[in-house]
Amino acid sequence: MKNLAIRDVFGLTLRDLGKKNKKIFAVSPDLKAATKLSYFFKEFPERSIETGIAEANAIGISAGLALAGLKPVVSSFGAFLTGKNVEIRTSISFNNANVIIAGTHGGLIGPDGPSQAGLQDIAVMRSIPNMSVYQPATAIETRKILEYSIKANKPIYIRISRQANKEFFTSSYKFTEGNPVTLNKNFQDGIVISSGNTLQNCYEAVEKFKKLGKKIGLINIPSIKPLNKSKIKNLLRKTNKVFTIEDHNIYGGLGSVILESLSDLDKKPKIFMHGLKDVFIQSDEVENLYKYYGLDSKGIFKFINKNI
Amino acid sequence: MSINQFNVDCKKIRKNTLECVFKAGSGHIGPSFSIIELTHFIHKYERDFNFILSKGHAAPGLYACLYQNQLLSKKEFFNLRKIGSKTQGHPDRLLFKKIDCSTGALGQGLSVAIGYAIGDKHLNKSKKTFCILGDGEMQEGQIWESLLFLGNNYLRNLITIIDYNKYQNEMSVKDTLDLGNLKKKLSSFNLEVIEINGHDFKDIKKAFKIKKLNKNLVVIAHTIKGKGISFMENDNHWHSAKLNKDNYLKAIEELNI
């Protein structure tokens, strides 16, 4: 699965899990080819529901399926699904309904532009009680997060990317809710914290610093909510400078999560937040967009270098 | 089934609702009183069902029906709208497991009801799902998403009821955003639509017994907001007005039970 796009891994894993777990349902508001729920739809038409372009109804039907004892996965672009805030808040979270909401097209998605891209989805979803928020960075992490989420019994939002990312893990990787995942322990000069797509670019930037003799660590956050506060605090105590990197609005995303986690730490490291500065992105190819917004490895290197 | 007994029950339910809301200091009486017969009928005579009060503000009426049918203790019932109570301002499944769906933000209950019905069918359960919508609630876009879905997907075990009491939060439905010819609209969605008197035992019984349809059933229940108390009927002041002692005693006296 290494070179597959995150969304394909999501779709294929769900299909595979559907073979054993007969309670899984897929609910799609007309975007199954893009979200890759199509794999499940093809294999299990009797457990697949097409709602048409009606996200609110899809969310409500998913809540009802869960309350009846099934395990629905509703998927559409994260921008569209999480825009239905009051429907998710009331029908899913206020019922503590066992629904997986998979918001695809998270981050800088390409020429389709900002209306289609999930850029505030993490902020919106983590503000809702009972809702967990996960974001996989790689193919293996996607599979592990989905396997965990299918077994869990609660509302979960998973932010899914449409792109293929570099693999950092082996099949022995275990997703543990709340746990930060350290990729590079050299924390002496600073720590970079990332989640999802930006992990590979952060890794390259950190490698470059390594060649220059700087010791900069790298932490991946697959479980954005909940995040194990004591674990993250223990890690960040070991440095004076923290750099949070995200392809999401700077308000309410990963950087905010880290700041909140450290709020009661006696001796705080300086935290530098890098992400989308409260803007709607523009259209272009994915790599051009990451470059334009300073979220490619060069941009991330520059941001860290300026502040180190 | 005795019609007289049923009507006496409904009077008791209205009396309990008044007492409960009076003690709590707030609560929606008018919208509660239009659903009493429908809600009591379901809880008294149906055996295996999910009940979704999409117009969640009528919660006091629902709680009074649950109390009448021994599904809620006296202590819990009269602890309306208080910290830690099962009887929160709007139905709250997190605190009261007998509530099949938390509601309160309008427009969402029918979608959840569809999910329940599909789920039960898949699991081969013989449960029915009842969903009560408000007429004002019909202005929500999500309702029409779900109706369009129902026009295309037949669910034998789902009964959708519209509590057509002709008023909404601020004024009449007609003066706010008229629903026009609702029966015609719904029929054009490929739904089986019947109109009943939502306070009439025989009408309700007949509606719930309809079988062998090949379209989803939508019951337009013509009701009266504030039903049962003369000075509350069709007076939208009682949508959520605070009940003072004089009005409370006047209403109780009128019920004469």
Image: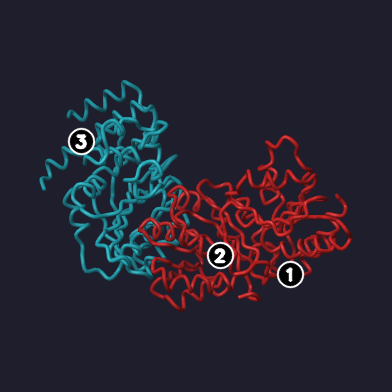
Which residue is located at x 58 percent, y 46 percent?
A127
Task: Kindly identify which numbered label has been placed on residue A144.
Answer: 2
Q: Is residue A249 above or below residue B225?
A: below
Point out residue B35 in the picture as x, y percentages from the top left corner: 29, 44
Residue annotated with mark 3: B11
Residue situated in front as seen by the camera: A248 or B254? A248
Residue situated in front as seen by the camera: A175 or B172? A175
Image quadrant in which the C terminus of chain B is located: top left
Residue A115 appearing in the image: no
Q: Chain of mark 1?
A: A
Point out residue A80 in the picture as x, y percentages from the top left corner: 58, 61
- Circle 3 packing at 10 Å, graded few (<14), some (14-19), many (20+), is some
Left or right for A216, reference B196: right
- Give the CA distance from mark 1 to mark 2: 26 Å
Q: Quadrant of residue B90?
A: top left
Which residue is located at x 45 percent, y 78 percent?
A43
Frontmost of labels 3 and 2 is: 2
Q: Amino acid at mark 3?
A: Lys
What shade does chain A have? red
Query: For numbered disc 2, what is the local secondary structure?
Result: helix
Residue annotated with mark 1: A286
Point out residue B113 in the picture as x, y percentages from the top left corner: 36, 57
Frontmost of labels 3 and 1 is: 1
Q: Chain of mark 2?
A: A
Q: Is residue A19 above or below residue B255?
A: below
- Give the CA distance from mark 3 to mark 1: 66 Å
Q: Is residue B222 above or below residue A200?
A: above
